[in-house]
Image: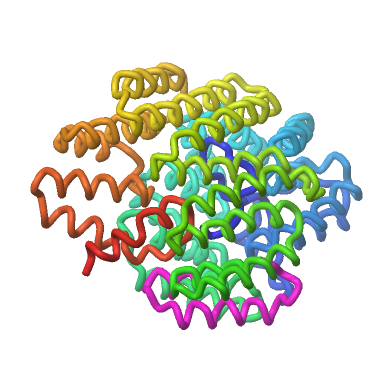
Amino acid sequence: MRRTKHLPVALPLVVLIAACAGEPAERETDVMVMPVTTSSDAALADFKRGQHAMDMGRFFDAREYLETAVEADPDFALAHLGLANIANSAAEFVASLDAAEERAASVTEAERILIEIARRGLDNDAEGQLQLAQQLVEIQPESPRAWLQLAGIQSGLNNMEAAREAMLRAAELAPDFGLAYVLLGNSYIFNEPKDFDTAAEYMSRLVELEPEEPNAHDLMGDAYRAQNDLANARDSYTRAAELAPDDALPLQQRGHVNSFLGDYDAARADYDAAIARGRGNQKASFAVYRALVSVHAGDPGAAVDELNELVAEIDGMDIPGPLGQKIFALTNAAQIALHHNMFDAAESILEQRAALQLEQAEQVGTDAAIRGARANIAYFEGVLAARKGDYRTATAKAREFMTLMEPDANPRKNEPAHDLLGLVSLLRGDHEGAIEHYEQANPNNIYTQYHLGLAHEGAGNAAAAQEIISGLAYNNFNNAGYALIRKDALEKAR
């Protein structure tokens, strides 16, 4: 994966709030400014530094700046919102968002919209978020940040044409605004329709603008990875590590590349070095990717064992978000165990994971979060049933998922249910039915799309199957799903 996400909220919200001053060059572009309400010049200066740090993926630096801003002005609503967006746990996210909302009465309309967008995310109200973001660009039409906020929500709704138009509008308004190129590049790497050459052009522009920012080189490495140029990707991550010798992320990224190159000892060494340097939740999250080396090496059982051991160790790691990291590790372990029909292990993992996921949802405290957790639990129970050949139970779990998600104003809410129904059809040999369901599932999920390819293969659609699976073979972005299908995809692509 690109990097650790701080909080699994309903839609990916882009961190795009208020004014920005470029660091370290200290440039400031008027058209990048959105209203900011604070009584303290010192707080505003730290907020701007924190904003740029977020733009450049330096979230630990951003946190320090924003905490200092809040100390200087405890009523600084957007600084509280910024802290919510880089929270280490669900409880921390909710506390910071609550603090922002408590101060919303004294800020501008644009600021209130940004706070409300975050709240709607907790309610999985994607349609409401979209309406608010459209309102934001109406009242701030010259603000690149307003357009990027809209783009982030459109991306979450998988409306990539509109999202990319909004990103380009932001780049037109502020041609030196690095975040616009970050989002454009990532869009063409991770979202269909993909275009890796176009992504590389945007990341190259980012490096030109921010040559001393480690994350610019890290993202350039991602573009090389997407192009299957692993040697240059490794060099870019090495350059990022040189620019930020205390940063763990570039070493983790290089570990991914070494996993794909089959240099498993080097991959584990990179992950170990990243874990040693890790801050916040990184020690736990990077350890998950270390375990995936065993999947790439053909030993899924060892990966499951390593992940279970990690879960047992997390409470002793002194990290800020142990609950979320346990869920992350168990989710990866469950995916591996289910794929390889390790049923006893999967049942134990899913039982533990379900309890933790409900605990996390209770921390968030919204009806949508609790229903979403129960729906996700039903999904995994359905996958287990399908893998065991109990198709009636699996189908019932898919229907349970849809029922739980029915109140949510999110047009993508049923994608996991279609993923599950696609698996049921595929395992039953109903390849046309599998195609129908998988085409309604997440188009950007590598594991899901691989199974769509298998369904086309089973239906005799050789050309369609080859096109889909060949496109996945060199994905080169690490998660359990890709680790599980990579070897077979590479063989089918040859």
Q: In the image, what residue occupies the spot 67% across and 59% down?
A: 54
Residue 165 at x, y = what percent?
A: 38, 55
Q: Is 453 drawn above or below residue 385 in the view shown?
A: below
Q: How many marks?
A: 0
* Colour mapping used in the image: rainbow
Residue 410 location, quadrant? top left
Q: In the image, what residue occupies the spot 46% across and 18% down?
A: 404
The residue furthest right is: 72
Residue 462 at x, y = what percent?
A: 11, 54
Q: Is residue 3 visible?
A: yes
33 left or right of 393 in image = right
Q: In the image, what residue occupies the spot 27% across and 31% down?
A: 424
Q: In the image, what residue occupies the spot 48% across and 54% down?
A: 479
Q: Of helix, strand and loop, which mostly describes the magenta segment?
A: helix
Is 234 a magenta residue? yes
User: Observer-nearest residue: 174 or 116?
Assistant: 116
Residue 267 at x, y = what percent?
A: 56, 71
Residue 340 location, quadrant? top left
Residue 20 at x, y = what percent?
A: 68, 60
User: Observer-nearest residue: 460 or 445?
Assistant: 460
97 left or right of 9 in image = right
What are the residue bounds of the magenta stretch?
Answer: 222-248
Is 387 a magenta residue? no
224 left or right of 29 in image = left
Residue 260 location, quadrant? bottom left
